Image (tube, grey):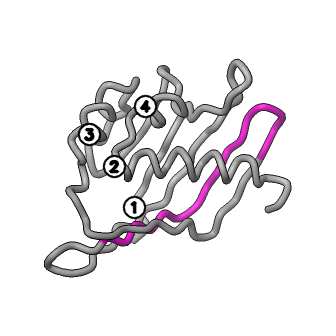
Amino acid sequence: MDEHREIWAFLDTHLNSIFNGDWDTYQATTSPELSLYEHWVVPHRQDGLAFHQFMIQNRWMGQPRAQRYDLLEKRCQRYGDTAVVTYTFMLSQVYEDGLRHHVHNETRVIVKLDGRWQVVHVHKSPAR
C-alpha cells in the first residue's frame, strides 16, 4: 500500500469534500467529464458535475452530528498516470435518532491531468 500512498491521500481529500459539503475541493478533484453509475439514484449513467454540485451544495446526507467512512478491502492498480481503486465503502453517521450505516462497493478511476489527479469515472454497486 505504501507505493500507492499518493493515490489514497488524494482519494481521502476527494471523499471528504463530498461528505463535508466542500464543492470547491470536489470540483478541483473531479474531471468535468466525469461519468458515474450510482445504482440507488438512477439505473443509468450520469455525466458531468451538475448533479453532484446540487447534491453537495444541498447536503445530500443531511446534517449528522458525527460521521466517518471506512474503505474495506482496498485495492489500487496503477498504470502510470492512471489508477483504478476498488473497495467496499462504509459510511457511519450519528443522527439524533441513532447510528446509520451505508455500505456499497465502489470503483473509482483516477487520472493525472495537467499535473493533478482527478476522478474521471465512478461505479457503485450494492454490497449486500
In the picture as drawn, the residue positioned furthest to the bottom comes out as 98
| Residue 29, above or below 32 | below
Q: Identify the residue at horizontal 26%, vertical 45% (top origin).
A: 41
- For the residue labelled by badge 2, is the local secondary structure a helix, a strand or a loop? loop
Sequence-wise first label, 1 or 3: 3
Sequence-wise first label, 4 or 1: 4
Question: On the rendered structure, is 55 left or right of 69?
Answer: left
- For the residue labelled by badge 4, is the local secondary structure a helix, a strand or a loop? helix
Residue underneath mark 2? 39
**Marks 1/3: CA distance?**
20 Å
Nearest the viewer among 10 and 43 is 10
| Residue 117, above or below 89 | above
Residue underneath mark 1? 126
Residue underneath mark 4? 24
Sequence-wise first label, 1 or 2: 2
Q: Amino acid at mark 1?
A: Pro
Is residue 127 rendered magenta in the image?
no
| Residue 95, above or below 89 | below
Magenta region: 78-93
Q: Amino acid at mark 2?
A: His
Q: Identify the residue at horizontal 20%, vertical 56% (top origin).
A: 62
**Marks 4/1: CA distance?**
29 Å
Q: Identify the residue at horizontal 85%, vertical 54% (top origin).
A: 3
